[in-house]
Every structure is written in C-alpha cells, then in structure tokens.
Amino acid sequence: MLTAYVPSASGLRKFDGLQPEALPGEAIWIDMKTPSPGEDKAVEKLVGIEIPTREDMQEIEISSRLYTENGARYMTATLMCGADSLAPRTTPVTFILTDHRLVTVRYDEPRPFALIAAKLGRSCSPNITGDGLLLEILDAVIDRCADILERAGADVDSVSSQIFEPSAEKGHARSYSQILLAIGKKGDITSKVRESLVSIGRLISFVTVETDAGRWNKEQKAQFKTLQRDVSSLTDHASYLSSKITFVLDAMLGVVNLEQNNIIKLFSVMAVVLMPPTLIASIYGMNFKLMPELDWPHGYPIALVMMLIAAILPYMFFKWKRWL
C-alpha cells in the first residue's frame, strides 16, 4: 500500500491507498507498507532509487543495513511492534533519504508512524523536507522505546513486590507460574527494545557522518546529538532493566525452591514422627504366643499411650531444635 504526504500551508496532506500511477511528484514522504512489485517500480521510477526487498531488509550485516547508493542513503532499523499486545515483536523498517524526499519501506505497523502522520497532518512547516521528517520519526521511535521501558520497569517493580512483600492475608497475589510468565514477558520486551535502540543508534551515527558536511544545519545537528544521548541513556537503562529482571527471576526460582524444600521437610518430619509408633504397633502386631504383654489386662491402652509418647517426643525435639 502506498501513502504519500505532500506539504501544505497547514500541514502534511495525506494521500492514502494510492495507485502506483497516481503518485504525486511533489510528495516529500512516501510510505510503502507491504509494497507490491508494481508499487516498487512506480516509486523507483519517481524517485530514481532501488527499493530493497523484504529479504534485503532482514539482513543483519551493517553493510547491508546502512549504505549509500546513487546518492541515496539506505538505513534499516529494527522497530518495536505490538508492545501492548500479547505478542510483541520487532520488524525491520528501511528509511531511504534522497535529496529532499524520504521513502520508508515496512511490513508491519510501528506505532510511531501513525503518531507522526497525525502530528504533522495537524501542523508542520510548509518547508519541511525528508531530513526533517526523518528526525521527527526517529524522535517518535525513541520516545516510544522510552515509554515501553518505563512501563516494563513499573511491571518488574510490581512483580518484585509480590515476591519479596507478599500480602499477609493472601500470600502471593498470583501463582508462581503466572509470576514466572510475567517476568519472561518483560525480559522479552526489554531485549527487543534494546535491540531496537542499538539499531537506531547505528542509524543515527551513520546519517550524521556525511561526506557533504553542509547537509545538516546547526539546529538539525543539535537534534541528532540529543537523539544520540537519548539512545545511549535508554540503552543503558535497558541493560540495567535486563539485569534487574535476571535478579527477580533468580529470586523467584529461589522462592520456589524454598517452598519445595519446606514441603519435602514436612514429609520427612512426619515420616520420622510416625516411625516410633509404627515400630511399637509392629511389635505388638506380631502375635507370638510367648509375649507376656498380651496377657496384661491393660496392655492395649498402655500400647496406645506408648505410641502417642513415641510420636510426641520426636516432634518436641524438632521444635526445640527449631527444625519446624
């Protein structure tokens, strides 16, 4: 699907669902979502560039993700998708920057694209170029990563409190399996965000190291430096959060092991407590003819008392040793 954005006095005009032959020549941003071969050829003809395939975008080598060809800069970054859903994922997005136009190629719906389209549709400079659009999109992507990390950090703190400060009445608010699933999900989201931040940081480093030093004005250079600092700080925060998630996971596994040990200890103590009464009952259950206790008139109650005492004494000993 092709979407073109044309600058106007009030904001970017959006032309959605365009046919390949209807692409406006004055468009400064062409957004290609899951493009067909016909759409690829139409954009290539209009802009004079080659559109990378989906397989090319999934390459992990830096030389395949960040390069210059025929005066156009090709930059592929990994962005987060579906962070609020049950199946968060990452997707490669290619930014192609020409003289005055930005072309984006994607096969998913990163949320920053919709946010930027709505924001610039309401208000933007009529002189905005592809360079400015790239800055706006990168800023929105980094803000989105920060929001995801903030929410993940709050969720990890909540899980941590459930492990170390369980409710006095109800114990753990959730079962151990649910807590482990929550920890695993937050770890997965954090690792995906860190992967996205690393790719964005490389993209910013590539786009700012220009052979034509006069491409970026002073304000844009300052914006790029701010974005680089944001990416660096968020990457550090994602690393910290990953370490915290690992600690919480280890703590959760330790709690589970303690619970299992307590259960095994209870069974062991019960077995030891019942061993002496079982021995007494076994002796007097043999029914040999020459057992003098069998002729005692009070032999049965005496045997019961002996079994009770034999059970109480080990229990009291364990309590005295604080093994229970």
Image: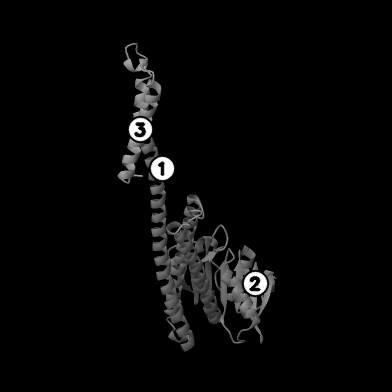
Mark 3 secondary-structure assignment:
helix
Q: Quadrant of the N terminus?
A: bottom right
Compare marks 1 and 2 and give the one earlier in the sequence.
2
The residue that appears at 58% across and 69% down in the rendered structure is 111
| CB under 8 Å between discs 1 and 3 | no
Compare marks 3 and 2 and give the one earlier in the sequence.
2
Crowdedness near tag 1: few (<14), some (14–19) or many (≥20) residues, C-alpha within 10 Å: few
Q: Nearer the viewer, residue 283 or 133?
A: 283
Give me the C-alpha separation between circle 3 and circle 2. 86 Å
Q: Nearer the viewer, residue 304 or 188?
A: 304
Q: Nearer the viewer, mark 3 or mark 2?
A: 3
Give me the C-alpha separation between circle 1 and circle 3. 25 Å
The residue that appears at 63% across and 76% down in the rendered structure is 118
Amino acid, disc 2: Thr
Give me the C-alpha separation between circle 1 and circle 2. 62 Å
The circle on residue 3 is 2
Q: Quadrant of residue 61?
A: bottom left
Horizontal side of 257 relative to 81 (left or right) equals left
x, y percent for residue 14:
67, 76
Horizontal side of 120 relative to 238 (left or right) equals right
Q: Which residue is mark 3?
A: 309
